[in-house]
Amino acid sequence: MIIAVDGPTASGKGTIARRLAEHFGVPHLDTGLLYRAVGRQVAINGGNPDDPADALAACDFPDELMQDDVLRAEETGGLASRVSVHPAVREALFKRQRAFAEQPGGAVLDGRDIGTVIAPDADVKLFITASVQERARRRWLEMVDKKMDHEEEIPLAEIEKDIVARDARDINRKDAPLKAAADALVIDTTAFDREQAFETVLEAVQEALAAR
């Protein structure tokens, strides 16, 4: 059983994917972390995330980088969006994601092109979305909650501006753009809290599996 969970940044897809994996007892992969690791490695290398060669070189990041909390930082997310536009980077990470999806017993993967590129044969495809304003609010609250004493608080308006820019890059990139698969279940979580969002998605997934 493969469940593909796609959607834009801060839509709640990661939390939903993790809970689905726990519910069904299968492994979960946040594929966005792979791109965040590449983006972070570019920064460590002193490279330019908009340069295809620098981005491709950063795909050879050490495995331990995937455990670094800095990957969750807002700045790293921006770097991930920039390196992900390069076809060579997406090709380099494709096999890694596909192998995870095909492991015995199944898996849940979340990202931006799981249902369209990585696992177009997934048993269930979800596209989780929410308004830009709500996604910015969620990200801001998350950052406020995790903010260290020495860090400056990022204005909500700046976060919203960054989300709009990321959406534009993800939707308009030539290779594997962000979009819902033709047979994906599109669920808007704008008006839901986390529990309501998960319950709505779980019910949709169970109905889709029962209909197969």
Image: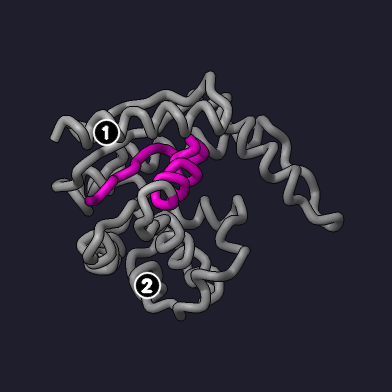
Q: Is 88 drawn above or below residue 148 in the view shown?
A: below
Q: Mark 2 points at which residue?
A: 59
Helix, strand or loop at disc 2? loop
Q: How far apart are marks 2 and 1 (CA)?
A: 26 Å
**Is residue 166 something that shows in the picture?**
no
The residue at 25%/60% (across/down) is 105
Asked if disc 2 and disc 1 are in contact, CB closer than 8 Å, the reply is no
The quarter holding residue 194 reads top right
Residue at horizontal 52%, vertical 26%? 196
* Mark 2 crowd level (few <14, some 14–19, many ≥20, 10 Å Cα): many
Is residue 116 something that shows in the picture? yes
Q: Is mark 1 on a helix, strand or loop?
A: loop
Residue occupied by mark 1: 180
Q: Position of residue 212 (x, y in %)?
A: 13, 35
Report whether 202 appears left or right of 19: left
Task: Based on the picture, tell me whether residue 9 belongs to the magenta stretch.
Answer: yes
Query: Farthest residue toward the right?
Result: 149
Q: Where is residue 104 in the image (x, y as percent from the top left)?
A: 22, 65
Is residue 180 in the magenta section?
Answer: no
Q: Give the range drawn in magenta.
A: 1-22
Of callouts 2 and 1, the N-terminal one: 2
Disc 2 marks a residue whose amino acid type is Cys
Numbered label attached to residue 128 = none
Q: Residue at the location (28% across, 35% down)?
A: 179
Query: Please, what is the three-letter code of the amino acid marked with disc 1?
Result: Ala
User: Image quadrant of residue 139?
Assistant: top right
Label 1 neighbour load within 10 Å: few <14, some 14-19, many 20+: many
